[in-house]
Image: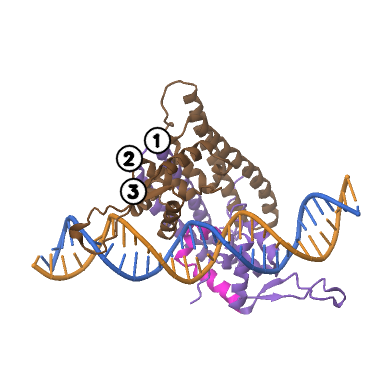
Chain colours: A brown, B purple, C orange, D blue
Amino acid sequence: MAKTDVLSLAILGMLAEQPLHGYQIRKRLGSELGPFRALSYGSLYPCLKRMVASGLIAADETDASAVRTAGSRRSKIAYGLTAEGESRLAEELANAGASSWDDDTFDVRFSLFTKTDSATRLRILEGRRSRLSERLEEVAEGLQRVRERHDAYTTELHRHGLERVEREVEWLDRLIENERSATRGDNPSTAPAGNN
Amino acid sequence: MAKTDVLSLAILGMLAEQPLHGYQIRKRLGSELGPFRALSYGSLYPCLKRMVASGLIAADETDASAVRTAGSRRSKIAYGLTAEGESRLAEELANAGASSWDDDTFDVRFSLFTKTDSATRLRILEGRRSRLSERLEEVAEGLQRVRERHDAYTTELHRHGLERVEREVEWLDRLIENERSATRGDNPSTAPAGNN
DNA sequence: TACTCGATGTATCGCCGCGATACAACAAGG
DNA sequence: CCTTGTTGTATCGCGGCGATACATCGAGTA
């Protein structure tokens, strides 16, 4: 089976561009997904090991600084995609299963949008939107009960949470509309609006 | 040292109202903090064990359904605060250390606001606000680099992230203003605005 | 020249949260 | 009667995280 988890997926996407060191992967992941979602070494290196073990990536230890036949110099390991890794990435990008609209998966998938076709992009955006819609109703409904049973602070917490979800839905609507108009062939631009 | 983690804190606050079963704790925590932050049994029961072991809570197994001298009926364990648990909760509520404005801690602290004094509330709100301000600058700065180096989707992801943080800052500002005017003694209401 | 500091780089350890899962008692309704 | 749902306790393995250790290297500075 070997379902690809979010972390592996993000790494696959990253290494598709070019081979990287573990350190660089961590740094770029932090800069691409934002300062949140930082990813610690305690997750990274074990994950890389797993991926090597399952043949998705390969470790290149041609030590750039292997000076002078010196003793045990093992440092600087560049990781790159194998053929299997590439096909797995492609497969995963095309599939975009129901888990793609989870809170912690969505932004990784979104950051890989340039590597996907418009149909898949739309599927993910709409999937995420419907997931949030469900939550919207759920929370709006619960908000009433919270108002009755709990204090004003708790209520305010829920109200703000609801507002946040509403914002994200609006955001998704804009993206979806944008994606649709691009598909309609108005112009070949694959770019979202970027209004400011 | 025994620093109290978020989970324990939430449980302490919950049990301060009344003794509860593990099952009820889980359910209420889900309904108070929102449908997110659900808390699985795999975290709950071990945590309860830890808390019992450190004397913060006590297990009351007076089996409500201990019918008829029957065999080994051990079910329905009600957990309640010990004296030590109460003082720990009070201490923790008053302290409100620097960790109180972490992403995953803040909402728990916020949901306990009715149990705290106005000064502590303000300290937490302002702490959270300044934490977000830092992040705001950080992200706004990084956004420029993302625009140059990355694709439009990644840029949009960051722009939206920035917007979300801005929203929360505005929200906090409203709460802070509200808390201040309450402290000024305009009226004894401890309630936030709740505008809608 | 030597010293220190910060970035780059690999790696592991223990803690603990999570999802899945198992089990049991009991109430309601078809 | 039998299935379904709720209440209830509990554990297992997986894996992410924060802390930490250690090594190398370039640049600035005393």
Mark 2 lies on residue: B149
Tell me if residue A102 comes above or below residue B98 in the rendering.
above
Query: What is the distance, in whole Å, between disc 3 and disc 1 at their CAs?
Result: 23 Å
- Within 10 Å of disc 2 (Cα), the crowding (few <14, some 14-19, many 20+) is few
* Amino acid residing under circle 1: Ala
Query: What is the distance, in whole Å, between disc 2 and disc 3 at their CAs?
Result: 17 Å
Q: Pinpoint residue B110: horizontal percent, then vertical percent.
A: 55, 59
Query: Mark 1 belongs to which subunit?
Result: B
Query: Is B87 a magenta residue?
Result: yes
Query: What is the distance, in whole Å, between disc 2 and disc 1 at their CAs?
Result: 10 Å
Element on which disc 1 rests:
helix
Element on which disc 3 rests:
strand
With D1 as the anchor, is A50 left or right in this view? Answer: left
Element on which disc 2 rests:
helix
Mark 3 lies on residue: A20
Q: Depth check: give the residue in front, C3 or B96.
A: C3
- Within 10 Å of disc 1 (Cα), the crowding (few <14, some 14-19, many 20+) is many
Residue at (59%, 65%) from the top-left corner?
A: B10
Q: Which of the image's four quarters has the C terminus of chain B? A: top right
> Do labels 2 and 1 touch, CB within 8 Å?
no
- Within 10 Å of disc 3 (Cα), the crowding (few <14, some 14-19, many 20+) is many
Residue at (49%, 48%) from the top-left corner?
A: A6
Q: Depth check: give the residue in front, B15 or A94.
A: A94
Query: Mark 3 belongs to which subunit?
Result: A
In the image, the segment drawn in magenta is B84-107
Q: Depth check: give the residue in front, A3 or B65.
A: A3
* Amino acid residing under circle 3: Leu
Query: Mark 2 belongs to which subunit?
Result: B
Tell me if residue A123 comes above or below residue B14 in the rendering.
above
Predominant secondary structure in magenta?
A: helix
With A24 as the anchor, is A144 left or right in this view? Answer: right
